[in-house]
Image (tube, rainbow, N blue to C red):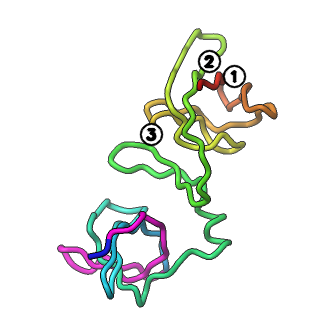
Amino acid sequence: MKEFKSIYKLATKAFHGLGDISNDTPDICHVYKEDEENFYGAWVYGIGFIDVRFPKATTRDLNPEEIEYYHGKNISLGGMVSTLNLKGEVWDKRVRVIKLGVKSLHEGKLTSPLKVGGAIVLDHGHFCSSSIMSMNEEKTLIHTRNSTYIIEYQD
């Protein structure tokens, strides 16, 4: 068994100890090891089976359009919110998030990029805002559907 840096791929066929858990259409999977004929990992979406066998014959790399589609999507694994990072972006900066008007303060590490349409997500879902509607160029003043936040970046 060859270990390698985990990556995302598209697959249709998938097999688990409980049986065939394949998809009719290609879907995204996270793989973390391989042998001569298979990758091993888990479907990104679904019930959460681990050590799933994805035959190499029915598994492929994501093309640029698929990378663009999946990049930045929020997923929930084991009750923790995470964001698919398919472009190698660094967004795990420590920040203080101050909610204006109610003296609310949250500190943590960003686990998803700050972008319009996304949310402020700290430490894999321990704090989440509603969707970001607008922000200034420095991404320090953010307006969501319900609130206004000040983001203070820490070193």
| Label 1 – label 2 distance at C-alpha | 6 Å
Secondary structure type for disc 1: strand
Amino acid type, callout 2: Lys
Residue type highlighted by circle 3: His
Residue 75 - label: none
Disc marking residue 99: 2
Neighbour tally class for label 3: few under 14, some 14-19, many 20 plus, Cα within 10 Å:
many
Amino acid at pointer 1: Thr
Residue matched to label 3: 124
Which residue is painted at 66% across and 39% down in the image? 114
Q: Where does the image place residue 83, in percent across and percent down from the top left?
A: 52, 50
Residues marked 1 and 2 touching at CB (< 8 Å): yes
Q: Earlier in the sequence, mark 1 or mark 2?
A: 2
Q: Is residue 51 above or below residue 140?
A: below
Look at the numbered disc 3 and give the secondary structure of its residue: helix
Q: Residue at x 31, y 74 (%)?
A: 2
Q: Quadrant of residue 132?
A: top right
Q: Is residue 113 above or below residue 43?
A: above
Answer above or below: position of 42 versus 88: below
Left or right relative to 144: residue 73: left
Q: Position of residue 34 (x, y in %)?
A: 33, 76
Q: Nearer the viewer, residue 83 or 33?
A: 33
**Mark pair 3, 1: CA separation:** 21 Å
Q: Which residues are magenta?
A: 3-25
Residue located beneath label 1 in the image: 148
Report helix, strand or loop for mark 2: strand
In reply to whether residue 48 is colored magenta, the answer given is no
Bin the neighbour count of mark 2 within 10 Å (Cα to Cα): few under 14, some 14-19, many 20 and up.
some
User: Quadrant where the N terminus lies?
Assistant: bottom left
